[in-house]
Amino acid sequence: MILRLGSDKKPGHGSHRRLETATPEIRQRVPVASSDVITQYFPEAAAHLRTAGLAKERLSDLWSGLLSDGLFDTGITTFPDGTGVIVAYADWPASAREQLTAAFKECVDELWACLDALVTESVAMFSIRNRLNDPDAPRFFPIGDSAESFAALLEQSCLDGVLASQFALIRDCQPYQHEPSDARLEKLRTGLRYLVDWSNGLDAGALLAAWATAVDPEIRTEPAATSVRVQPQPPGELADERVVAQYTVEGWSPDITVSGRAGNYIDFAFPDGFVPAGPDDTLDERLRHAMLVVGMFGVAFAKFVEQTPGTRRLPRTDDGDPAGAWIDARRSARRWTQSELDEVAASELGLGVIRDENILTLIVSTPDGTFQRVVPDASPLPQRVARGTAAENAIQDAAATWGLPDFVLRPQQERKGSGLREVGDGLLVVGERGVVVQAKCRDTEPKGPARESAWLDKKIAEAARQADGTVRQLCSQPSRMINGRGRTVAVDGNTISWAAVVVIEHPEPPTDHRIPKIESRIPAVVLLRRDWEFLFNQLRSARAVVDYLHRVGGSTEVLGTEPHRYYELAAADRDAASEPIESVWPADAGERRSVPLLPAAPAGSDDDEAHAMVRIMCEDIATSLLTEQSEQDLLYVLAAIDRLPVGYRTDLGRLLLDSLRTVRDTPPDEIAWRFRTFRTTVPGEIQLGFGVCSQFSEVTREAFRSWFLLRHHERGAIEPLTNLTSVGVMLTPNRTGHRDWDTTMMAITGDPELDPEELAGSQRLWNRPTGT
């Protein structure tokens, strides 16, 4: 805020008194608001930016109040020798500077909090695809005064988990940086320098003050003097009083009356180290610049997110702890009575259903107790994108986020005759199974239950026809499509077993709408986008969701009841899993275990860190450098690993994590190993082998290869190896500090054709009795 002072009052000669203050001239207040794109991806950061804007407004209001109360005045004093001074005065009320400083500090703190939140929310958003070096280390926006200090901050894992593009931006905008030379980067660096300087001053106890700048002071005399020279003084802090200009009246005498105009700008300032570049360089302008810069970081971070398809956590509509989606029903805020829970447990399905406006709550009876499963509404759609497009993107993002982006294929246009035809609204292909995804979005205001039911029936029938057409097209000729990692994938519809899913995006779907019978050549399932996200959030596996859709083979009777059906099938799986296992493998081949294909608890709710290991291994494999020719092999391997039942993943992940911690302490002259192999009772299924070794070298790589080939060879005692596939993954501790482990993958189909000497050596090495 700026006050311009001026007066035409005439002091007496040799006098020293204050002049009246003219009406202050206040610059227009321009609020700084976070854009929609920041709010969409970084709600916490956007909230801090909004709070910073409110703190700045409060600072402006406090300043305006002080101006209105006559905080400042000016006076002119002429001395007998004809020299004189224009003086600005400040009469600070008690605690006024402290109040201004508190508002300023809140603004600065909130801007820092916004930058920190951009980092923490980015890490959380992408933590689904990579393990952090130190999950407990705080993440923040680092600022160093040198390359060495910045490197020291990075050693604290402060940026571990952000995108490479986000990291590069933070690095290039460090205040000490001058390269690369770029006007936009320099603008960002300047804003960060302001924040650093202000924080240092505030920490030292500095207070906001006034800053006086003489712009065009003027002295007039009556009668006119032969010469009047006015010399503005350097700008500076106005604590109590400050000379803002000096003047000389040539030929001054007592009968000459001197008047003038102060011509000052007085603004609030943080005088600690403040050196303005000109009259327009004020704290107010610098604060605007800093807020703009922080907003620019937010927009840049959001753009980087948008350029990274799929692999991120979706925003949720529930405000509670995500872990609260599955809790012991006795701890529910709904305060269920024991009799109510007993009634659910005694019911035929062991399932209770409660519908609220935006949340579906299920009470699920399990052998481990009765639990509450909260199914929130679908993730919010961005407002700045057409609703239909936003819904299609959200449907693909859910599959890529909780599944794998490699299996999500974007809709492509194929030429048909003289026209173009789109290949569905997207495909989900995992191995030999695929799903055609058709999205139907209601982008107008609902017009009553009857009209909306008619719209649903029409769109569902239309989607089924489109899905049939997509499969016919894919079977008539192979198509090249782009998956969620931006890679080209060949799709031959004749080699894939197809199903269809119609995902409904509707702001107010009619209650109890009965899904019409679908005329379709392939199985088709109709569900709400909320239920699509529920399936992926529940299973966290693209293959598991694809298998589920193939398994059910049709829709529920009523739209919106897919979670009910899921838990009916989960109860059936639970009962089937308790039956004895008939195995074709020898009794000493390992531990026989059976788990439900559809777990009651959401995947990872028992140990999220351990459960995420399979996903992270797949990310390691998927992001390795591969040639285009090996892309199909990569997808085959990823699909094989994703076939691992959800119920085994937490146990496997915990074994791998604990083994990594254990072998990390192995002396350098020793080598430690841990292994786990998964074989199914189904003939022809892919075998998975996982190993952890204390160090990586060509020796250990070849040793793992010998173990892997031996385990694959041993399958030949049960069934022919000709078409059998095994996949092996080895983890070794990474000691560079940049990542927790390195991942090595091997795969083989068919007979490894081990010569007798090689086979005997592998058996001696790996089939020794325990303890030898």
Image (spheres, rainbow, N blue to C red):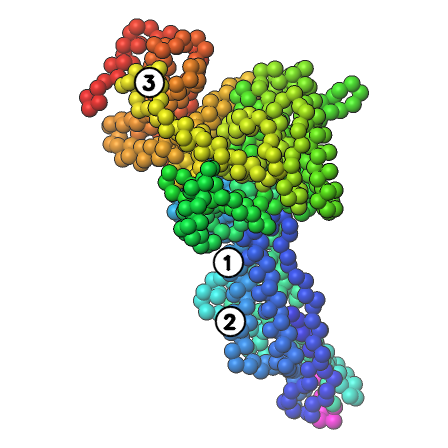
The front one of 126 and 529 is 529
Q: Amino acid at mark 1?
A: Val
Residue stretch rendered in magenta on the structure: 248-256
Q: CA distance from mark 3 to mark 1?
A: 56 Å
The residue under label 1 is 196
Which residue occupies 37% across, 29% down? 578
Near mark 1 (Cα within 10 A), the count class, few <14, some 14-19 or many ≥20, is some
In the image, is 672 to the left or to the right of 224? left
Q: Is residue 651 visible?
A: yes
**Cβ atoms under marks 1 and 2 closer than 8 Å:** no
The residue under label 2 is 207
The first of marks 1 and 2 along the sequence is 1
Q: Quadrant of the C terminus?
A: top left
**Cβ atoms under marks 3 and 1 closer than 8 Å:** no
Secondary element under disc 2, as helix, strand or loop, is: loop
Q: Is residue 643 magenta?
A: no
Question: Which dot marks residue 87?
Answer: none
Q: CA distance from mark 2 to mark 3?
A: 69 Å
Secondary element under disc 1, as helix, strand or loop, is: helix
The first of marks 3 and 1 along the sequence is 1
Q: Is residue 731 visible?
A: no
Q: Main secondary structure of the magenta part?
A: loop
Question: Which dot marks residue 707?
Answer: 3
The front one of 240 and 125 is 125
Q: Is residue 251 magenta?
A: yes
Which residue occupies 62% across, 38% down? 559
Q: Amino acid at mark 3?
A: Trp
Q: Quadrant of the N terminus?
A: bottom right
Against 4, is 772 above or below?
A: above
